[in-house]
Amino acid sequence: MTDWDAAYSNAAYIPDSGRWPAAWDGPARDYRTAMLAAGRASLDLPYGAHARQRFDLFLPVGRPAGLFVFVHGGYWLAFDKSSWSHFAGGAVARGFAVAMPSYRLCPEVRITTIAHDIAAAVAAAGAMIDGPVLLTGHSAGGQLVARLATTSSPLAPPLRDRLRRVTPISGLHDLKPLMLTKMNGTLQIDAGEALRESPAFLMPLPGIAITAWVGAAERPEFLRQSELLGTVWPGVTVHRATARHHFDVLDPLVDPGSDLMEAVLGG
């Protein structure tokens, strides 16, 4: 019998895992400070009435080539936009504006509602920045951006039409096994929500380049989740990042020339 709690326990299987997420806080804070000093950051922009319905926007030098949105993870239960700001660096250096939203968390809301929060954040940022829209998200954030790329997406049609690339990183695309974990006492995923919100059980929007990115050293369940999306969604590229685990898989986002940035933004 599968121990589903262990299957989703990343930190227990990563050496020195206690460094995260605190290891990101300093670089994220320094990046915000530098971008504010340069006049290229706007923080806590509202996309709704709730205190967590806010996003930060980082701008490149010159006219943006488009909008890149990064959605953080935390099993829909934890964290906010403040720990990840520096991961905008690669996209900003490539000429893209980068939006990083916080969102309401379970159990205050359900995962279904969180997807609508992200759609609202993308719409608000998209109203400020012209051009193509590219989405990436980590872990639970990977589920959320993949969900926005489906035919039942909560994104309004004008934003759907601007979507060009979606790159879930270590995404959770099949929510059914999470129903068997202890944390589902808080998440409250039921069979209906698992079917509605699991990208693997939905159809992708046409015309979008999708890459399911996952660390090669991640837990087997996370490898399965990305491989599943590559199996059931036509045209999806699945990439296993050599030697990367669930936390350091994000590191190449700071490097504008990395293979991850090529997948996220295109050549």
Image: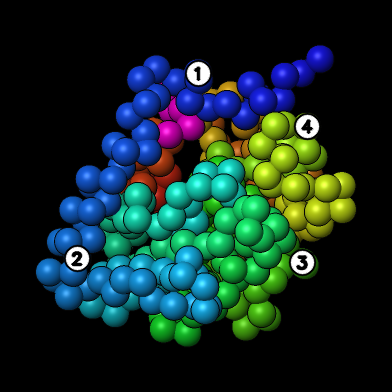
Can the viewer see residue 246 in this picture?
yes
Q: CA distance from mark 2 to mark 4?
A: 43 Å
Picture residue at 66% right of the left edge, 37% below the top? 183
What residue does disc 4 label? 180
The mark found on residue 35 in the picture is 2
Q: Are circles 1 and 2 on residues that touch, CB within 8 Å?
A: no
The boundaries of the magenta stretch are: 242-247
Of labels 2 and 4, earlier in sequence is 2
Of labels 1 and 3, earlier in sequence is 1
Can the viewer see residue 173 in this picture?
no
Q: Say what amino acid the circle numbered 3 marks.
A: Thr
The mark found on residue 151 in the picture is 3
Q: Nearer the viewer, mark 1 or mark 2?
A: 1
Label 4 SS: helix
Q: Say what amino acid the circle numbered 2 marks.
A: Met
Q: Nearer the viewer, mark 1 or mark 4?
A: 4
Q: Say what amino acid the circle numbered 1 marks.
A: Tyr
What residue does disc 1 label? 13
Q: Nearer the viewer, mark 2 or mark 4?
A: 4
Quarter of the figure that contains the C terminus: bottom left
Q: CA distance from mark 3 to mark 2?
A: 36 Å
Percent position of residue 179, x then y: 78, 38
Percent position of residue 156, x then y: 66, 79
